[in-house]
Amino acid sequence: MSQTTKRALEASLKNLLRKKPLNKITIGDIANDCGINRMTFYYHFKDIYDLVEWSCMEEAARAIDGKKTYQTWQQGFLQTFQMVLENKSFITNVYHSISREQIEVYLYTVTYDLLIGVVEEEAVGLNVTESDKSFIANFYKFAFVGLLLDWIKKDMQEDPQEIIDRLSTLVYGDVSRALKRYQKDKSYQIPHND
């Protein structure tokens, strides 16, 4: 029942965001739209931003579910773009409000989750530390989220498939090469320009 109520509150928030900006929406507005009392809201969320964060994480988890492999990361990232596009009024409203940081944090979390799965898969059989694998995933995370945030900032005009295609061409094979460079036996040396 708890998830059902949370989803109903999420639906009410999204409905209200079609009519007014996030900073003009109150917990009372959400409760009224949802047909519950304010205390029920507080039973599930501490404030509106907690609801926004939960909603973002739920959407993101659905977008990348099962797409955390080298063969499927492009599809997971494309689905993240599509999820943002499907929730355009919600994302745009949150992005342009005082909780913009929440959108960024959620995108970083989701993208890292997607990329660390790819890195772990490509690292099988290699002697690479967890710290180095995390560093590689974080490097790509910042690049990917930067592209996504720029796309949101530009009102989501560019076709997400074109962005993913260009990104795929750019990073093809790079995760494997990076992991080999970080191997502890160092049999694969980083080329130096002398």
Image (tube, grey):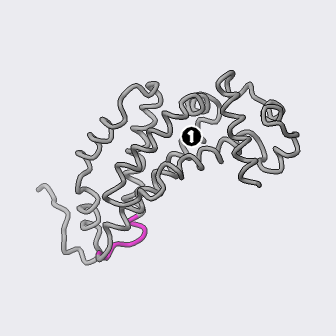
* Pick the front one: 6 or 111: 6
- Residue type for callout 1: Ile
Task: Tell me the magenta residue range.
Answer: 126-133
Label 1: which secondary element: helix
The answer to whether 127 appears left or right of 50 in the picture is: left
The answer to whether 92 appears left or right of 117 in the picture is: right
Q: Residue furthest top?
A: 19
**Which image quadrant for residue 128?**
bottom left
Q: Residue under label 1, please give it.
A: 103
Which quadrant holds the C terminus? bottom left
Name the residue rendered at 34%, 49% in the picture.
74
**x%, y% of residue 83?**
50, 40
**x%, y% of residue 90?**
60, 32
**x%, y% of residue 42?**
83, 46
Name the residue rendered at 25%, 78% in the picture.
185
Badge 1, how many Cα within 10 Å: few under 14, some, many 20+? Answer: many
> Does the magenta portion include 147?
no
Name the residue rendered at 56%, 40% in the picture.
103
**x%, y% of residue 142?**
42, 47
Q: Is residue 12 placed above or below 39 in the rendered structure?
A: above
Name the residue rendered at 57%, 32% in the picture.
95
Which quadrant holds the N terminus? bottom right
How many tags in the picture?
A: 1
Q: Is residue 95 placed above or below 144 in the rendered structure?
A: above
**Which image quadrant for residue 145?**
top left
Q: Is residue 77 placed above or below 25 in the rendered structure?
A: below
* Pick the front one: 65 or 49: 65
